[in-house]
Image (tube, rainbow, N blue to C red):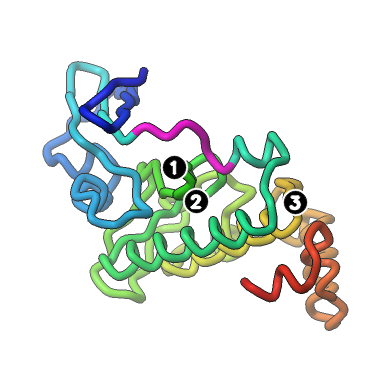
Amino acid sequence: MALCNNDMDLATKNFTVQGVTYTRNEELLGKGGFGVVFGGSEGHVIRLFGMNKIPQMISFVIEFAPQSLYDKFKMKSVTPDEAHKYFKMLVDGIEFLHSEMLVHCGIKPENLLICNETLKLADFGKSKRMKNKDQKFKNEECIGTKQYAAPELWKNVTVEGRPLDIWCCGIILRQLSQASMEFWEIADISDKQYSRWMELIKGGKVTRSDFCYKFKPATMSKF
């Protein structure tokens, strides 16, 4: 639902909660994400203006975004200049989160919202607060959408947080460069498409055209 607050459009997002007792506000957005999102000090993080907790439901009032990167992909409307701009904004947003000792753990086009042509990170339900930059987490705590999950999540019991976000950024870059969301189902050798890609990399046979067949090499050199 869209609301209006002076010159800014707002939206509400409702979550159903069953059998869970929350004792701290930050837990309402996942372990660690509350302070950064609520403060809204970074231009590439969606702003949270308030929340209301009632039995079995949590309602957030957030900055309204008319579309996501997923919508742009579906409309096949991502231009080379936009691809460059959006990826830089994504990297800036992730760099900010990591500097605040947070990892997102759920980066995908649906969670990259676009407000006035500015890409913003949203949905911090999987986010984690790091005690140190090399802190490890249980793999099952960090798996969001499997297509965007890093390979180590399927191999190791514990994983470092920051590389998971960086892997997702790489997937987004590949999608932006190809103006398509098509890629492997899971980053594991059991997946034929992923296995083929890894064989090309190990054999040193990956060319620029393999990575960015949609855009000209001169365009991709900006990234």
Tell me what residue is drawn at x 25 percent, y 39 percent.
Answer: 48
- Considering depth in this image, is 85 or 105 the residue closer to the camera? 85
Q: Secondary structure at mark 3?
A: loop
Image quadrant occupied by the N terminus: top left
Mark 1 lies on residue: 116
Tell me what residue is drawn at x 84 percent, y 67 percent.
Answer: 210
Q: Tell me the CA gap for discs 3 and 1.
A: 28 Å
Q: Amino acid at mark 1?
A: Asn
Q: Is residue 51 left or right of residue 168?
A: left
Q: Is residue 66 magenta?
A: yes
Mark 2 lies on residue: 107
Image quadrant occupied by the C terminus: bottom right
Q: Are marks 3 and 1 in contact (CB under 8 Å)?
A: no
- Considering depth in this image, is 208 or 151 the residue closer to the camera? 208
Q: Tell me the CA gap for discs 2 and 1.
A: 20 Å
Q: Which mark is residue 183?
A: 3
- In this view, the residue farthest toward the bottom is 204
Q: Is residue 180 left or right of residue 155?
A: right
Q: Where 81 falls versus 9 (above or below)?
A: below
Q: Secondary structure at mark 1?
A: loop
Q: Percent from the top left, x then y, of residue 35?
A: 19, 51
Q: Secondary structure at mark 2?
A: loop
Magenta residues, start to end: 64-69
Q: Percent from the top left, x then y, of residue 110?
A: 53, 39
Work out whether residue 124 can be spotted: yes
Q: Which mark is residue 171?
A: none
Tell me what residue is drawn at x 19 percent, y 50 percent.
Answer: 39
